[in-house]
Amino acid sequence: MDRLGRALRAQLVELIDELTPGADLGLLFLDEPNVADWHEPLRYSYSAVFRGERPEGVGAADVASRAADQLSPAGWDIAGPQEEIDGTKRTYVLTARRPDGTRIEVRTGDHNSAVLYSGQTPALALREPEEFQWPEPVRTPETLTPGCVLCYECDGLGACHGCGGRGWVPSEPRGRSNCRQCGGQRVCPICRGGGQLAVFRLSPYQLTYYPELSQ
Ligand SMILES: [Zn+2]
Ligand SMILES: [Zn+2]
């Protein structure tokens, strides 16, 4: 994984130096892998976006085909440059892919001098999938503080009972979404994680959950 990130960075540096010399490569951030796929187990990839400027007198089509000339002998499968036309703007897009799944895209058009580079390593899992362990309750009838009752919402769990304390729930298509019950706070919204409620603080509405208290 780190090797893929370093290889991508090296190739981007070479490409940027060649096509847009003088660009500030200190701005090429490729330090940490980010989550690329939120399905379990999470998949990570290195990715970077960089903007360079074409030297004066060099056309966009020329830059795009030189990118192909440089990447092709280095083992990249090249697609393009393809022309994308949006009104009067003509953009050349070159995509390159390595057998390991790393991708680079170079995008530039004659309407301005920008050359946009983007690169991404394939998304890889960093660990084996693990089955989620539902947490143990923080309070049980045996461990209640005197004068308290088990929280009617979570029944002593303390953690949010919608998500089990993860703050998210599995969902499609992204793989995860924020837990609506706790809003990502992870704890039960009623007892704030304590698992129990003081009887003297219960509202008349909350008391209806505890018919035994009014007997
Ligand atoms: Zn939740
Ligand atoms: Zn609760």
Image (tube, rainbow, N blue to C red):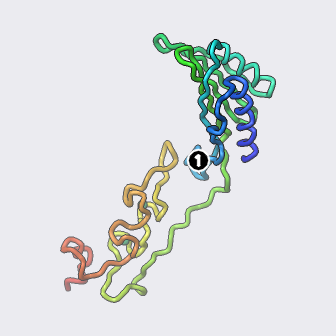
In this view, 147 is above or below 126: below
In this view, 153 is above or below 101: below
Q: Is residue 69 left or right of residue 111?
A: right
SS assignment at label 1: strand
Q: Residue furthest top?
A: 88
- How many marks the image carries: the answer is 1
Which of the two residues, 113 or 96, is positioned nearer the viewer here? 113
Pointer 1 residue: 35
Quarter of the picture for ligand 2?
bottom left
In this view, 196 is above or below 173: below
Q: Residue, x 32% and y 83% (percent of image)? A: 148
Callout 1, which amino acid? Val
Residue 71, image x, y percentages: 75, 25
Label 1: how many residues lie within 10 Å, few (<14), some (14-19) or many (20+)?
some
Residue 22, image x, y percentages: 67, 28
Which of the two residues, 156 or 50, is positioned nearer the viewer here? 50
Residue 108, image x, y percentages: 59, 20
Which quadrant is home to the C terminus?
Answer: bottom left
Q: Is mark 1 within 8 Å of ligand 1?
A: no
Q: Residue, x 64% and y 43% (percent of image)? A: 45
Residue 66, image x, y percentages: 72, 18
Q: Residue, x 32% and y 73% (percent of image)? A: 152
Q: Is residue 169 left or right of residue 153?
A: right
The image quadrant of residue 106 is top right
Which of the two residues, 147 or 20, is positioned nearer the viewer here? 20
Q: Residue, x 67% and y 17% (percent of image)? A: 63
Q: Is residue 196 left or right of residue 70?
A: left
The image quadrant of residue 119 is top right
